[in-house]
Amino acid sequence: MKSNRALSRDRALKAYRNMLRIRMVEEAIAEHYSEQEMRCPVHLSVGQEAAAVGVCLALTDADRAYSTHRCHSHYLAKGGPLKPMLAEIYGKVDGCLGGRGGSMHLTSPEHGMMLSVPIVGSSIPLAVGSALADTLDGRDSVSVAFFGDAAVEEGIWHESANFASLRKLPVLFVCENNLYSVYTPLAERQPNRPLTQLAESHGMATAHADGNDLDAVLSVSSEAVARARRGDGPSFLLLDTYRWREHCGPNYDNNIGYRTPEEFESWRALDPIPRYRRALESSGALSAKAAERIASEIAAEIAEAFAFAKASPLPDASAAASTIYA
Amino acid sequence: MTALRTISMADAIREGLTEAAKRDPSVIFFAEGVADPAAVYGTLKGIGSVIGHERMIEMPVAEAGLCGVAIGAALSGKRPVISFHRVEFALLAMEQIVNNAAKTTYISGGRHHVPIVLRLVVGRGWGQGPEHSQSLETMFSYFPGLKVVMPTYPADTKGMVVAAVEDDNPVILIEHRWCHYVQGHVPEGYYREAIDGPRTIRQGKDITIVATSYMVLEAMRAATALAELGVDAEVIDLRVLRPLALAPILASVRRTGRLLTVDTGFKTLGIGAEVVAETTAKCFAALKAAPQRLGLPDHPLPSSRGLIRGLYPDSIRIMRTISEMLKLPAEREAQAEAELAAQRGSLPIDVPDPFFKGPF
């Protein structure tokens, strides 16, 4: 495994901060959700932070990312600002979409966070289209499609993979396998074969990594990005991870019968954030005091962003009929 | 100064696409068989030689995926034109059209645009049958965020094709296969016509006929026959189904007091239903007779030329319906019907009527 030494200290600290920030934002959303002021569905990314941060650390602002209903981690990892994100979830005028989209559509084109689409598989071809445009226009940008293990059950994933591979487009297909589609485990939905085989059958490079290991994710992502920029075509990255909380909503639901508390605990032991922190501490890149400071800085930012989102006014109803057309 | 010459609608489409693509290097084309010998009924023929073959993108048989790819390219600065040989194939791409094409401008607060043209061809005749001859314009017209154009005449078509490609919004262009053969005077070179609503193609004072696509031709033929009976029909080519600009129709009905709509698709829940509902609500006091609608019956469209007898609205049905609305003498109407039937003669019912080739 690549060690933290492969990363500059600044970059490693950024990775740690980004993961912790996503975790703390999600936990804060979960905490405030019962106030019933965030009146939209939320699909939290708790437990899956390393996948988003590891991939996005390999990207630049000029690279484009497309996400799903579970988009908070991707939005933040790609550089989307926190205040407009929370204001969007609160349905406020200062939201990144002015309240049009809610939690499932987080978008920040300025940071290459192009679009989040909650219909499973729907945003995958958009990344391929971006990559086609970049290729035709001679740009060396890379496009990323984030999706879950259920998306490879969709025909549109195969259609997108076929075309991207055919034309050797600079795409990263990033599959975060969190083992469940809502309550249904992977084994009840797909035969027992490696998910990477699906991509191999489309003739593209694949990599399988521990999605809770930041360095491992960054390593396979960096290789895939380099491959894409060289013009050697798309890659499929399979990242094993786990969704800690319920599919939709702020709670834990290990008690309702579709998965066991033991399974959850086994994954919690693989929590990507303390793992990375321990590695940083043992390499001397991060002191306990510095870690403390990072956490308190993030907490202050989150507190300010929540205050901002709550204080922001609701949009005027007349705005519902604006920007339907360009 | 552009010269007028006579070409078909299919050629007008090709010219419009070519001119738009020549002016804007971001225009790219997707189709299954984009550069094959048939070139989507000839409508894409030779474009690659003019603009560069790299801009003609062969589309795997993957309508949903490639529609999404085209939308993604549109989000990244391209102006894709994606052609489907039949509207039914676009049904596979419906999720992309309804969500990502229609809503991305909206959910991005106007920061993203989706300048894409989707060409959908409606089939008819020669036994096309239940899944190759549906006229599904209503489905696509249902969604705010899309523009839906359904042209009839070659000049309109060329101009609106150019406007569609240049539009920053997703535009659905619904082409009736039988309209591809229609001839007309079409300006040469670059020629743009705004996608701005209906066009009145025949003025009259007794009744307003609102029709789409091929049914406009049937309506015009009926209007000519009705003139012999002393009825002066106004014919409006709806052209743009979304955004639906009703003002010219309302103004017309306020003058004529009567309205007949003629759909190429189903009568039930057809575009005519919307036109009649809105017109009735807004012009109720001006109406002299209950508005009427013509369209396809409530069953799938069969293949056999035996089973399609009487299926499609035509000039005779249009004339008969209007005669009833105006309470014309039955004998005279029957005589006019016989004359129209004689004009068609022994022509089989599953081929286009050469009468409608024009030039118009």
Image (cartoon, coloured by chain):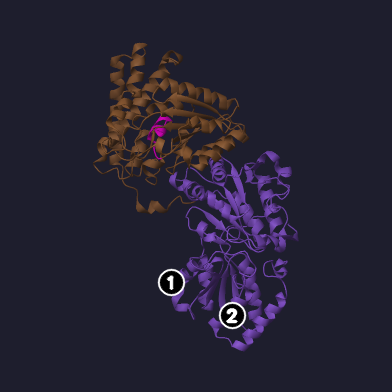
Chain colours: A brown, B purple
At numbered mark 2, what does the secondary structure look like: helix, strand or loop? helix
Instruction: Name, please, the residue furthest toward the left.
Output: A35
State the image coordinates of residue A288 (x, y, percent, origin top left): 29, 15
- Quarter-of-image position of residue A271: top left
- Which chain letter goes with mark 1? B
> Residue A219 versus residue B271: which sits nearer the camera?
A219
Q: Which residue is mark 1?
A: B281
The amino acid type of the residue labelled 1 equals Ala
Q: Which percent across, then down, holds residue B339?
A: 69, 81
Which residue is under mark 2? B320
Residue B33 location, x and y as percent?
A: 67, 46
Please identify the quadrant where the N terminus of chain A is shown: top left
Q: Tell me the kind of residue under disc 2.
A: Arg
Q: Nearer the viewer, residue B301 or B144?
A: B301
Q: What is the span of residues highlighted in magenta in the rendered image?
A: A69-80
Q: Using residue B200 as the reference point, say whether residue B291 is left or right of it.
A: left
- How many tags in the picture? 2
> Visible in this render: residue A171?
no
Depicted A21 relative to depicted A314: above or below: above
Q: Chain of mark 2?
A: B
Q: Earlier in the sequence, mark 2 or mark 1?
A: 1
